[in-house]
Image: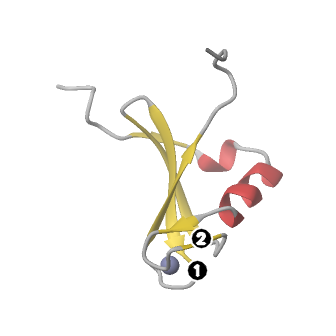
Amino acid sequence: MSDTNERIPRDFYQRDPEEQQAFLENTWCNKCQQVDLGMQDPIEYEFMGRIFIEGKCNVCGEPSITEVVEDEEGTD
Ligand SMILES: [Zn+2]
């Protein structure tokens, strides 16, 4: 029963449609080594206290993972 290494599922589709679209377009693919190729089948989850959106690269189909940087923390 560890809560440190588990993915906590979140609902990507709860986000604004515009925001969803932005996440689907603004991607980085490790395999293609290119930005903004786009992804499909997005899954959002929390891991180690951070939020990620994982989908499949539109070009190669490999997992494309985007970390969501929420703007709610104060700046240091
Ligand atoms: Zn790719």
Q: Nearer the viewer, residue 37 or 21?
A: 37
Across and down, in percent, residue 69 comes to 61, 37
Question: Does the residue tagged 1 have its C-beta within 8 Å of any atom of ligand 1?
Answer: yes
Which residue is painted at 63% across and 19% down in the image? Answer: 73
Split into 4 quadrants, where in the image is the N terminus? top left
The picture quadrant where one finds residue 28 is bottom right
Question: Does the residue tagged 2 have its C-beta within 8 Å of any atom of ligand 1?
Answer: no
C-alpha gap between disc 1 and disc 2: 5 Å
From the image, tell me which residue sits under label 1. Answer: 58
Q: In the figure, 24 relative to 15: above or below?
A: below
Across and down, in percent, residue 76 comes to 61, 14
Labels 1 and 2: the sequence-earlier one? 2
Q: Is there CB contact under 8 Å for labels 1 and 2?
A: yes
What's the amino acid at mark 1? Asn
Which residue is painted at 29% across and 37% down in the image? Answer: 6
Q: Which mark is residue 39?
A: 2
Categorize mark 2 by other alpha carbons within 10 Å: few (<14), some (14-19), many (20+).
many
What's the amino acid at mark 2? Met
Q: Nearer the viewer, residue 15 or 49?
A: 49
Across and down, in percent, residue 22 comes to 75, 57
Residue furthest left in the image: 1
Q: Indicate left or right for 74 with 67 as reference.
A: right
Residue furthest front in the image: 76
